[in-house]
Image (cartoon, rainbow, N blue to C red):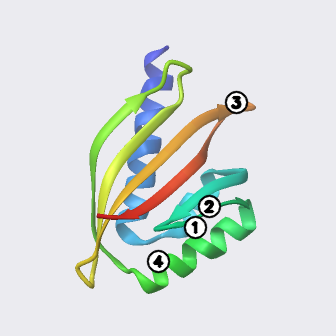
């Protein structure tokens, strides 16, 4: 893997982390593929890009982030990148957050995004 690709993917993880920290679903939406596996607490669905944006917006409207910290970053054997973090809301609720990014058609896309209560 070249240095440019690796640093671009690290920037992507940071972009998504910053979006989660600020509750900016629009930034996440830009990285969604045509479908996204989105889990919010116990509700797990595969949504279209537009549906996923609405569900994420709704989640952030009810759970305004106070902070988000990446706990672990990694890469699968297939080259997909992922990060696990902790999202804490202004209500003091903590969510274990996971996002999985893969290359598709030369673009990095969020394939999976999860928010699980800790």
The residue located at (40%, 62%) in the rendering is 116
Mark 3: give few (<14), some (14-19) or many (20+) Cα within 10 Å.
few
Q: Are marks 2 and 1 in contact (CB under 8 Å)?
A: yes
Mark 2: give few (<14), some (14-19) or many (20+) Cα within 10 Å.
many
- SS class of the residue under badge 3? loop
Q: Name the image quarter holding residue 56.
A: bottom right
Is residue 36 rendered to the left or right of residue 74?
Answer: right
**Dot placed on the residue nearer the N-terminal end, 3 or 1:** 1
Q: Are marks 4 and 2 in contact (CB under 8 Å)?
A: no
Q: Position of residue 64 (x, y in %)?
A: 37, 80
Q: Position of residue 111 (x, y in %)?
A: 62, 45
**Dot placed on the residue nearer the N-terminal end, 3 or 2:** 2
**Residue 90 drawn above or below residue 9:** below
- SS class of the residue under badge 1? helix
The residue that label 3 is drawn on is 106
The residue that label 2 is drawn on is 29
Is residue 97 rendered to the left or right of residue 53?
Answer: left
Mark 1: give few (<14), some (14-19) or many (20+) Cα within 10 Å.
some
The residue located at (64%, 69%) in the rendering is 53
Q: Position of residue 48 (x, y in %)?
A: 76, 61
Q: Position of residue 112 (x, y in %)?
A: 57, 49
Task: Tell me the tag on residue 26.
Answer: 1
- SS class of the residue under badge 4? helix
Task: Compare residues 47 and 110 and report the one nearer the observer.
Answer: 47
Q: CA distance from mark 2 to mark 1?
A: 5 Å
Q: CA distance from mark 3 to mark 1?
A: 21 Å
**Dot placed on the residue nearer the N-terminal end, 4 or 2:** 2
Q: Are marks 1 and 4 in contact (CB under 8 Å)?
A: no
Task: Tell me the tag on residue 60.
Answer: 4
């Amino acid at each position: 893997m070249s240095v440019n690709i690796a640093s671009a993917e690290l920037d992507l993880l940071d972009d998504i982390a910053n979006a989660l920290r600020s509750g900016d679903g629009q930034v996440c939406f830009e990285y969604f593929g045509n479908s996204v596996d989105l889990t919010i607490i116990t509700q797990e669905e595969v949504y279209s890009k537009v549906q996923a944006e609405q569900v994420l917006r709704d989640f952030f409207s009810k759970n305004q982030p106070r902070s988000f910290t990446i706990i672990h970053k990694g890469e699968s054997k297939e080259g997909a990148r992922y990060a696990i973090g902790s999202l804490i809301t202004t209500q003091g609720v903590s969510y274990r957050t996971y996002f999985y990014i893969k290359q598709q058609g030369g673009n990095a896309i969020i394939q999976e995004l999860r928010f699980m209560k800790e």
